[in-house]
Amino acid sequence: MQNYIFKSLFVVLLFTIATSHAQIRFGLRVAPHVTWGISDNKITTSNATRFNASYGFMIDYYFTENYAVATEFSMQYFGNSLTVDKSRFTSVTHNNISHIYPANLTYEYSLQYFNLPVLIKMRTKEIGYNRYYGEFGFSASVLARAKADIEYGSLRIENSTINEPDEQDVLLIQASQSYSDKVSSFRAGLIIGAGLQRNFFGNSLLIAGLRYENGLSGFTQDDKWKTRLHFIALNLGILF
């Protein structure tokens, strides 16, 4: 299914490149966003909401006056709290020793991704100084950095590099040996948004809008505690 989607988007991109009277617009953007996670399993809970942001460079390719294919080169930041329910690990036997876990295992993730979305944008004709637009597309993100604060009862480890932890950050907890706490190197999402473009100093356009991204893939490597990240962003930028 994912291969079909990306092939279709590639065909659309080739078509727009071959279209005459095209216009390429470059710009900068910043997007403060509210992030939350949804656990797709019965082992973990993720109820925390975090305020984060993304920033970067954007390219809009208008193959007609009101329709464009767009992409961005953005750095995204996410935060999420993931708690492993102790009741799921009430008793585990290891080396003939029975372990009963007295507390939940909690991870406070701090994630950084390099994001490259592909979007279709549609806008109205100019109304006064404004144009109103809608956008739809797919987001593909590659992990740049993953840190986590880990808490288990009285034990707390801060700012651990979760995918390649230092020796002093390795937790000897039976529950974490049963489930990988590492972060996936790839994240996919579905984007929908709307807003306005306003003329500013000649041909420059100020952009303000809202964007919702629905996470399609979990951010953890282990699907046994799969959790998807979603966000709503205030999308601000300028096209030159």
Image (tube, rainbow, N blue to C red):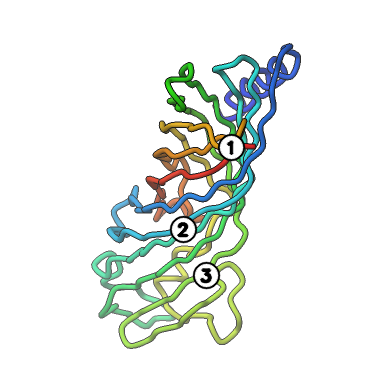
Q: Which mark is residue 212?
A: none
First along the sequence among labels 2 and 1: 2
Callout 2: helix, strand or loop?
strand
Q: Three-letter amino acid code at disc 1? A: Phe
Q: Which mark lies nearer to you, 2 or 1?
A: 1
Residue labelled with disc 1: 201
Number of residues whose C-alpha sits closer than 10 Å to that of mark 1, classed few (under 14), some (14–19) or many (20 or more): few
Q: Position of residue 128 (x, y in %)?
A: 43, 23
Callout 3: helix, strand or loop?
strand
Residue labelled with disc 3: 147
Q: Nearer the viewer, residue 237 or 121?
A: 237
First along the sequence among labels 3 and 1: 3
Callout 1: helix, strand or loop?
loop
What distance separates the C-alpha of mark 2 from that of mark 1?
A: 34 Å
The quadrant holding residue 80 is bottom left
What distance separates the C-alpha of mark 3 from that of mark 1?
A: 42 Å
Residue 106 is left or right of residue 143, and the answer is: left
Q: Residue at x 36, y 64 (%)?
A: 81
Q: Nearer the viewer, residue 90 or 168?
A: 168
Q: Nearer the viewer, residue 104 or 69?
A: 69
From what the image shows, is residue 5 above or below residue 164?
Answer: above
From what the image shows, is residue 198 above or below residue 67?
Answer: below
Residue labelled with disc 2: 78
Q: Residue at x 45, y 51 (%)?
A: 223
